[in-house]
Structures are given as structure tokens and as C-alpha cells.
Amino acid sequence: MPENSKGNIVGAAIWMLIISLLLFWLPLIGPLLAGIVGGKKAGGVGSGLLAALLPGLILGGLLFLIATSLTGFPLIGVIAGAGGVILSLSGIGPLLIGAIIGGLLA
């Protein structure tokens, strides 16, 4: 199998992020389409799921770090950051379903 035919998880995550941002006005269809394209670009179901979770985890982690560093009380920052993590991962359901479908199509 040539090296170019393998999926790229980072590239798939970028595709998912861009398509999700462009289709934000379609609540369920936009992330589903982004997941299908990203899962197909990732090259498989496992890679597609990882590519779908990667942007949410990175964004949640950044929100967690920023909220913790901006507050004077670390405990309040941790609670606010945990809320950001949950918020960033709450809308990822259709993206994961699309990643599974796209991974199966690859």
C-alpha cells in the first residue's frame, strides 16, 4: 500500500473543523456532512473518530487552561474550564456519527 493512500488524521480534523464552521447554520446536517468528509479523509473508522474528537479535546483543553489562568482563584478557573470542556464536546454527536459513516465509506 503506498504511503499517500493512507489517511491523515490531522488533515481530516482540519477538514471537519472548516466544514463545520462553514455549515454552522445547518444544526444536524452540517456536522454530519463534516464528519462524513473527515472520516473518509482519515481513511477508517478509528482514525475518523480520533479526528472528530481531536478538535473538541484541543479546544476544551485550551478553554480549561485559559479559564484557570485568568481567574484569581484556581478552583473557580477549574470549574469554568470544565464547563468549557463539556460545552465543546456536547455538540460532537452528529460529527462522530458522520465520522463512522465516512470511515466505513473509505
Image (cartoon, rainbow, N blue to C red):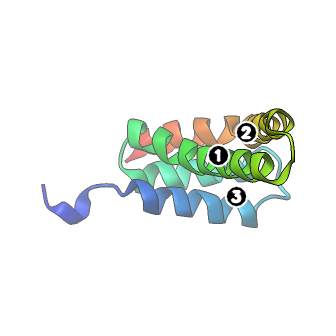
Q: Amino acid at mark 2?
A: Val
The CA distance from mark 2 to mark 1 is 7 Å
Per the image, the residue denoted by label 2 is 85
Identify the element where label 2 is drawn: helix
* Above or below, 70 relative to 46: below
Marks 2 and 1 in Cβ contact (< 8 Å): yes
* Image coordinates for residue 3, horizontal then vertical, percent: 18, 62
Q: Amino acid at mark 3?
A: Ser
Secondary element under disc 3, as helix, strand or loop, is: helix
Estimate how packed mark 1 is, as few (under 14), some (14 to 19) or many (20 or more) residues with alpha carbons within 10 Å: some
- In this rendered view, identify the residue nearer to me: 1 or 69: 69
Vertical side of 5 occupied by 51: above or below = above
Front residue of this view, candidates 70 and 8? 70
Residue identifier under label 1: 61
Residue in the image at 44% along x and 58% along y: 10
SS at circle 1 = helix
